Amino acid sequence: MLKVNNLNSGYGKLQVLYDLSIDVPTKGLTVVVGPNGAGKTTLLCSIMNIANVFSGDIIFDGEPLAGVVTHKLAQKGISYVPQMGNVFAELTVLDNLHMAGYMLSKSEANDKAEQMTEIFPVLKKFIHRLAGTLSGGERRMLAIAMGLMKNPKLMLLDELSTDLAPIIAERVMTEVARMRDDLGITILMVEQMAKRALEIGDTAYLLVSGEVRYTGKADHLLHEPELCSMYLGIKESPKKDQAFELSVSDEGSEDH
Amino acid sequence: MAPWMSSGLIYASGLALTAGSITLLYIVTRTFNFAVASMATIGFYTVYTGVTLYGGLPYQYYPLVFIVGAISGFICYYGLNRQLLRRKAAEITLMMSTLGYDLVLLSMIQMYTDYLTHTYKLFPRRVTMSLFDFELFGDRAAAFILPAIAIGFIMILHFFLTKTKFGIAMRATIENPILAGASGINSDLVYLISWIISGGMAALGGSFMAMAMTGTPVMGMYTIPLMFAGAILGGLGSIYGGILGGLVIGLTEYAGVFLLSQRFGPWVLGYRMGIPLFIMAATLLVFPRGLSGIPLTKYIKNLVGQKRGVNV
């Protein structure tokens, strides 16, 4: 569905990504993992035409996206959920949903918002509350619901688990897997909670210093001890049969 | 109504709109629009041209004033601001570009006044617009009509921003342009509409102010410090704050001049601009985030709590 070929991009004159190529298959969950500063967010920003693309191709549904402005990308069916600032804090939950479905007609937007409150019942309780007053987990649910409002073909999710308590992050990950399984949405997810993301993902890319270091099945990356310990903070566990266990020290999770 | 009060209301209504215009553009495009000075003057000359060449009352030309101001905003956005925003220009560059546009507009206003003088034998360089007003309830009609128009305009703006899809999209873009774009909102259109509304507000404000002061080609340049003082007093974060700031600055100027000249003599008139600027500085010392940063809800809750004997 989405092909990125030899992408060189960055911000201003600063290059962040170098000859990066990825392939996002239809109805799959593609995970991009890597250490801080690897360029994961820049990849999504390049697709959304927020970062500067110096060279390379981004092809969505057979159509090149070069020069297509951000709001037109949304109209083409690409939904982007940024890592930070992913809700309009000064608008109500309902207005957030309506803004996310800006391209829909009023009745379509109402129906879709209703559907979102069924998928995410927590939002129904706070439908007339300002989004800025929601908790971190509720905001993330709202952000995902906003992403779904557009009936997207492709969702770009940027580090949804950031700053969330582990139990909430786990719930968010479950929702992501459900979107792929139940709604059949193609997802490209950038994630720092690497182990869980690789467990639910289909295809994985390991990004280091703006370059791809691993391409393959997501769960197979968990069996690459060198890459996992060096770049993802996932250490080998001596206790269990499973090859590796999570130890993402910079997220405050505990070693098992 | 005392003369200072009626003039103050007229002037403050105009200043409120111009300060609101500055604030609107600042929060949407991060641009301090210096061209608001000449846009205000254009508003005045639109009314002047109407009443002198075609007759009637100044009020009937206000829709036209808004349109002319909106066009000047449209030109500034498409010809200048948009190009610079696309090149990710710094705020200082955006600001200075509006100063350049203001100077272009000012030159055109000067030429236009010369044209009116030579072609129609008018004297457009010092105009007392209040001469075209009529009496209402024993006072100048403008003292009632202009605040009413300003309030009506603010109510329409409020309705537009809170109840219409595009208005909410504007607020969304103001808060988070990247997310708004990702949601399918055309931020370019939002910026354009902001410039159009802002230009219209500035022109309307200028035409109001000319009903209380002498209309000249440089009236906008003369009053721009106060327009910005109003916007800054409002806190620069809220359109309503800017409008309120303009209102306070305009009223305190007239009230201050009246009260202080009664006490100290007419020499105070020479320092009339200092009074509202002093009020602005004093207010910002107490409330650094301006009027829109005052936690009114908290104060009201505290007040209600104290009355009930409850510490909220």
Image (cartoon, helix red, strand yellow):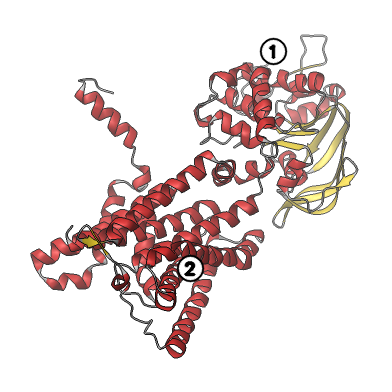
Where is mark 2, residue-wise? B35
Question: In terms of secondary structure, where does tag 1 sit?
Answer: loop
The answer for how far apart the CA atoms under marks 2 and 1 are is 64 Å
Label at residue A256: 1
**Does B274 sit above or below residue B293?**
below
Question: In terms of secondary structure, where does tag 2 sit?
Answer: loop
Nearest to the observer: residue B283 or residue B61: B61
Callout 2 touching callout 1 (CB < 8 Å): no
Q: In the rendered image, is residue B235 in sight?
A: no
- In the image, is B103 to the left or to the right of A191? left
Nearest to the observer: residue A197 or residue B287: B287
Nearest to the observer: residue A59 or residue A222: A59
Nearest to the observer: residue B137 or residue A233: B137
**Does B23 sit above or below residue A221?**
below
Q: Residue at x 73, y 36 (%)?
A: A79
Pointer 2: residues within 10 angstroms few (<14), some, or many (20+)? many
Q: Which residue ends up furthest to the left in the rendered image?
A: B263
Q: Position of residue A76 (x, y in %)?
A: 79, 41
- In the image, is A52 to the left or to the right of B93? right
Q: Residue at x 85, y 27 (%)?
A: A28
As shown in the figure, which amino acid type bears the numbered disc 2? Ala
- In the image, is A82 to the left or to the right of A197? left
Question: Where's the C terminus of chain B, which quadrant?
Answer: top left
